[in-house]
């Protein structure tokens, strides 16, 4: 193999001990996981909302956002189940910043050891504050440092066709959302769920294991190929496909960003609230389809929009909650959306 060893990483158990999760927080994570599963399985009729920054950076802004979301959660928790996006791993179409777990300072060289500490410390603090969190499983090899903190996991559009990620999803204790691929094919998205709900024999941490299968693997519709896929006819296609494959706990979460919010080929994240309302209104006369749609994924941060990072000008970066990856809704718009969804439910 062709690579150069940069340094040996410390055992992940050492870093976990450095940033431990309290017993009360651990119990809260387990309750949150059960509540998410109950929503997906139909025992809880709240809407599941996966909401937060496109990428969890910088951490002080993430903490500020978490505090605001926690206060709002006290108002809406009877109707909405809020899970905060705390995404530390970023897939790229070609190349670019791969998230704080690999590069905690986007203007400095990658430093995975520092990134693991940065991400573990940040995520632990949010969980200890009482919020359930979500991440995308991009780098499955370092999952053990973070998986105990998560109440919901995404398998991204570029990973959901990958057998390793499907097997990883099959072994998770929490619910996992499998996105449809970037080209938008719903059938392939459902194939990912079939694989994730199935048992597999694989190698984990030097052991031959058999996964249990994840009965709460579900579909995340994110559009594809420059087109949305959240209209009633798309939900109907999902319902038929899930029935054909006898999917357990059939469920859909609609990602109202990405290709679902394109205008003339460009993302318009200000459309996210309108898309949520459009879906709920459009399914009023289709209770069978409405029952399948369990919630939404929303990209949101403290400030609306996003910024480009110029590594040669680190002093120019806005550290106050302006996304450095995809554009997000600002906090005021997010709060208004969640209060409105709570009233509608």
Image: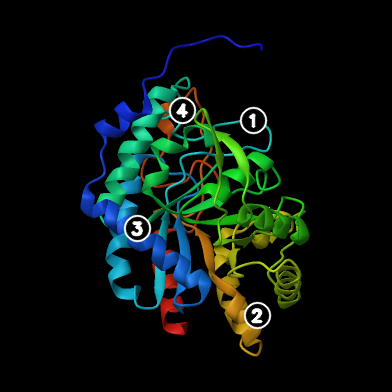
Q: Position of residue 130 (x, y in %)?
A: 27, 57
Most foreground residue, 35 or 329: 35
Which of the two discs, 3 and 4, sits closer to the camera? 3
Residue denoted by label 1: 95
Q: Earlier in the sequence, mark 3 or mark 1?
A: 3
* Farthest-out residue, bottom: 285
Per the model, the C-alpha gap separating discs 2 and 1 is 38 Å
Is residue 131 among what the camera can see?
no
* Secondary element at tag 2: helix
Identify the residue shown where x is 36% and y is 20%: 10
**Badge 1 element:** loop
Look at the numbered discs 3 and 4 and tell me whether their residues touch, using CB distance below 8 Å: no
Q: Position of residue 225 (x, y in %)?
A: 77, 53
Distance (Cα) linking label 4 and label 2: 42 Å
Rendered position, 316 above or below 240: above
Residue 278's x, y, as percent?
61, 77
Q: Which mark is residue 30?
A: 3
Vertically, is 54 above or below 141?
A: below
Of residues 65 and 285, which is closer to you in this image?
285
Quick one: SS at disc 4?
A: loop
- Mark number displayed over residue 103: 4
- Closer to the eye: label 3 or 1: 3
Quadrant in the picture for residue 13? top left
Query: How was this image coloured?
Result: rainbow
């Amino acid at each position: 193999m062709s690579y150069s060893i940069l340094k040996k990483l410390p055992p992940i158990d050492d870093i976990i001990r450095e940033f431990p999760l309290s017993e009360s927080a651990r119990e809260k994570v387990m309750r949150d996981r059960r509540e998410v599963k109950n929503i997906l399985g139909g025992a809880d009729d709240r809407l599941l909302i996966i909401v937060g920054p496109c990428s969890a950076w910088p951490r002080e802004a993430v903490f500020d956002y978490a505090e605001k979301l926690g206060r709002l959660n006290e108002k809406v928790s009877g109707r909405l189940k809020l899970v905060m996006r705390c995404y530390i791993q970023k897939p790229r179409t070609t190349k670019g910043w791969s998230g704080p777990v690999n590069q905690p300072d986007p203007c400095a060289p990658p430093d995975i050891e520092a990134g693991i500490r940065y991400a573990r410390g940040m995520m632990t603090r949010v969980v200890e504050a009482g919020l359930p969190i979500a991440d995308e499983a991009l780098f499955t090899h370092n999952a053990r440092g973070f998986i105990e903190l998560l109440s919901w996991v995404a398998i991204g559009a570029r990973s959901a066709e990958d057998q390793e990620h499907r097997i990883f999803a099959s072994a998770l204790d929490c619910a996992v959302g499998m996105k449809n691929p970037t080209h938008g094919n719903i059938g392939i998205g459902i194939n990912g769920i079939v694989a994730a709900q199935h048992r597999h024999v694989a190698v984990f941490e030097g052991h031959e294991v058999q996964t249990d299968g994840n009965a709460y693997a579900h579909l995340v519709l994110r559009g594809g190929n420059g087109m949305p896929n959240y209209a009633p006819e798309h939900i109907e296609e999902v319902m038929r496909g899930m029935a054909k494959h006898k999917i357990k706990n059939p469920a859909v979460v609609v990602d109202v960003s990405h290709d679902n919010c394109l205008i003339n080929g460009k993302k318009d994240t200000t459309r996210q609230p309108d898309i949520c309302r459009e879906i709920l209104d459009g399914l009023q006369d289709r209770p069978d389809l409405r029952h399948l749609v369990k919630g939404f994924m929303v990209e949101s941060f403290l400030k609306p929009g996003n910024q480009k990072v110029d590594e040669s000008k680190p002093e120019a970066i806005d550290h106050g909650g302006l996304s450095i990856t995809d554009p997000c809704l600002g906090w005021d718009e997010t709060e208004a959306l969640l209060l409105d969804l709570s009233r509608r439910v």
